[in-house]
Image (spheres, rainbow, N blue to C red):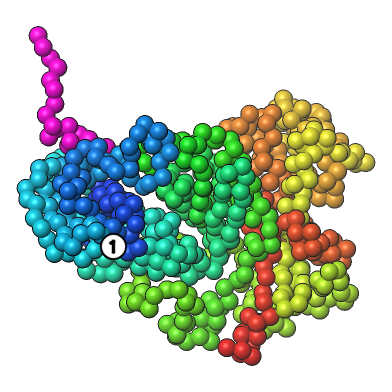
Amino acid sequence: MKELNRLSEEITHILAAGEVVERPASCVKEVIENSIDAGATLIDIRLEKGGIKKIEVYDNGKGIHPEDIEYVFERHTTSKIKSVDDIFKIKTMGFRGEALCAISSVSKVILISRHYQQEQGCKVEVEGGKLTSKTVYPFEKGTKIIIEDLFFNTPARLKFLKSPSTEQKYCTEVVEKIAICYPEISFRMQVDSKRQLFTPGDGKVESAIASVFGSEILKNLIDFYLEEQGLKVWGYFVNPVLSKSTRSGYYFYVNRRFIRSKLLSSCIDEAFKNSILTGRFPIVFLFVEIDPVDVDVNVHPAKLEIKFKDERFVYNTVYKAVLKALQSEKIIPKPDLDSVYLHQGIQENKSSIKPSLSFVHEKQSEEKRFPEDLREFLRIEEQFDFSELELKREIRDVISVFSETFDVETYKIVGYAFDTYIIVQKDENLYLIDQHAVHERRLFELFKEEVIQNKIQKQILLSPIIVDLPPSQKEFVLRNIQFFERLGFEIGDFGKNEIVVRTIPLLLEGSVDRYLILDIIEMVYNESISVDIMQVSEELLKKIACKAAVKGKMNISDLEKEEIVRLVLVEKKIFHCPHGRPVVVEIPKKDIERMFKRIV
């Protein structure tokens, strides 16, 4: 008995729409991409009820010729592919010719367009994939598409949509992501007649980023750039003092197409591994320019995922570009002293602070909106103990005068605060250096190198250290003596529940006592539950370095202070502790003068 059925055209269109049109945001993305391909310099988006009721997009691009307009709703009609070779060198945002077909099959669509070579416009109406009318229509240059009652003929899909506010959020995120990569286009977005987003279209990526995320992100942008063998990698990351709890701050663009990429995410994770707080993630705007033949953009229905021909080369180039910027002086954070003034009441009215963004169109001030889920961007992590630094108190309470000044390449040690922060002056700036964070990073790097090369230098103890352990931990240590030897600790059985430690790593000389050994054993013991015991992890080395490093409130010698200044400011080798916290803060003289009202 025959069981196979040939599906009707109506059903195949609806099934195909499921691959492209998942929610209102999918429609917004597809239509905007068409506008970009049409050469638009202005794209205006308007939504009602999160796009579920209505999506309207206008662009001032070249328009659609009246002889083509009705065919844009048929499957696989496109002007962007003419041969098989074109499939492997895609340079446009859209190329499959199925977006409008898919959208129109599950909604009611009105399309109005005037081709730049025509004197009159044309209007067509499509409902459920069927053309219902086509008329001549007076219209300005460009194209307007109105999508109404999405999923009106597929109630099962309509049921799975979120609330209008959630769908609105998804739509807004789509526009934001595209706007950043096309700063030469002015994007305007309204939701239920309220201004949601405005970008100036001045051609500057920084302007688009500021329009989307605000001036705080703009002030903390750090650029990077690298070009190798025809592959160009560039962009910005935000100083790690501003971070996120998820990878939602990863914005990746390949040939100006926003993508998701496990490869690039892994690369950014690795590059920032020792420059950001554990459990936090950076905000990165990464642009990759690559020959289209070296990338396949046709591996995902919504074109969100791609495949590189040479993944290793792309990974290494991106990694080097970002790491070089992370190791530069640009990364030194500048504290936002405005928040201190406001807290003191010196600045009585927050609204009196004027934005310094000359490129932001004056209309933007009408209704400035920061997405709720991006407010986290605009919050500085409490990585600095400003209460301890007491910047709000008079300077005389912070700085204790240092008896001997250290002068190398115009850097001078002028003070020492709270037995923790070295105060250095150069030209018109003060630098506060956290002695613990610097020493911790130095120990970590040196210790890590010795362990990796299996060349750990040991110090024989004149008086071995006896450590009492619970039976379970003692048995664990004796069973894994070779592991502890790799770290520089020679350990033996001392009877009962005791072990004897006869050598320690030379790098930790002066820092090791029975309490540190107990801490190390505890860390190794806990880590062994989920990690191969013979693999020395970086996390373990970080913890050991942190435990062994000179602490805050621990007065160090003049020579040690000088060495720390050399490492941070002269040789520029250390800008973060192993856990990603900054080791140095720069305070310009003008900011101090503002605190004293010398300047305003």
Q: Position of residue 94 (x, y in %)?
A: 33, 45
Would you say residue 560 is visible in this rendering? Answer: yes
Q: Position of residue 212 (x, y in %)?
A: 41, 64
The C terminus: image quadrant:
bottom right
Q: Is residue 264 magenta?
A: no
Residue matched to label 1: 60
The N terminus: image quadrant:
top left
Q: Nearer the viewer, residue 579 or 425?
A: 425
Amino acid type, callout 1: Asn
Position of residue 62 in the picture relative to residue 330 (left or right): left
Q: Residue at x 39, y 59 (%)?
A: 179
The residue tagged with tag 1: helix, strand or loop? loop
Residue at the left extreme of this rendering:
132
Q: Residue at x 20, y 59 (%)?
A: 118
Name the image quarter holding residue 53.
bottom left
* Depicted 270 relative to depicted 234: above or below: above
* Depicted 358 relative to depicted 270: above or below: below
Q: Residue at x 68, y 46 (%)?
A: 543
Q: Which residues are magenta?
A: 1-22
Would you say residue 164 is visible in this rendering? Answer: no
Position of residue 412 in the picture relative to residue 82 (left or right): right
